[in-house]
Amino acid sequence: MNTQITASDAQKAELDGKIMGLLFFMETHFKDKSEAASDSYSLLSKIGKKDDLARYIEGMINNPVGNLIEVKSSIDDIMRTMAITFLDAKFIKQGELAHQIGLKSSTKTYISYVISLKDDTTENRRIFFSILSELEFSQLGETLTFDLKFVRPESIMKMEFVAKLL
């Protein structure tokens, strides 16, 4: 019987050991995740199989920078969604001033709205710009660019939107 251990076997064993070490840490220190960590630890230590949690940890070990970028991207997506939700709610609250309001564009770093006012006055525009300013001057303004355009009712009717608010 050949009991020789290859370099790749040793690397796999080392990686599995690191994963089990982190799973053990999670099991003992994070009570709310302890059941998932315990199941994952048991699966890997007893039959050598990795579940989603073990594969996630393996990815963190193998590519820590990539995982940090992925986490940052997820946080950015959540923040953009929160900004849109905030603006939607605030703009809808001012709906009596507008014919139509629509989210024109939304990318990772850019959010654009188009509004057609019933009475296109400086004061009515200021109301909408002040809502937008709440986010522009917050930390969200450091990572997101906001745009607000006012157009005539006949122009807005021809536009396509990601979402129509009114």
Image (cartoon, rainbow, N blue to C red):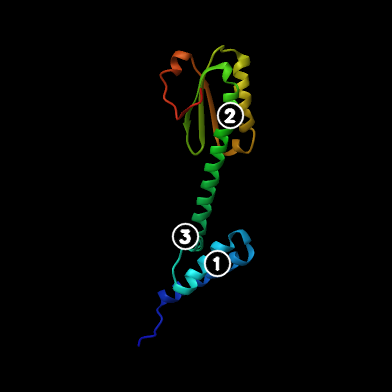
Amino acid type assigned to the residue bearing label 3 in the image: Asp
Dots 2, 1 in contact, CB < 8 A: no
The x, y position of residue 113, in whole percent, is 51, 26
Q: Is residue 6 above or below residue 153?
A: below
Nearer the observer: mark 1 or 3; the answer is 1
Look at the image and tell me whether residue 125 can be seen: yes
Amino acid type assigned to the residue bearing label 1 in the image: Ser
Q: Secondary structure at mark 3?
A: helix
Nearer the observer: mark 2 or 1; the answer is 1
The x, y position of residue 146, in whole percent, is 55, 30
Find the distance from the CA under tag 1 to the CA under tag 3: 13 Å
Q: Which mark is residue 52?
A: 3
Look at the image and tell me whether residue 15 can be seen: no
13 vs 53, nearest the viewer: 53
Q: Residue at x 58, y 17 (%)?
A: 96
Amino acid type assigned to the residue bearing label 2 in the image: Ala
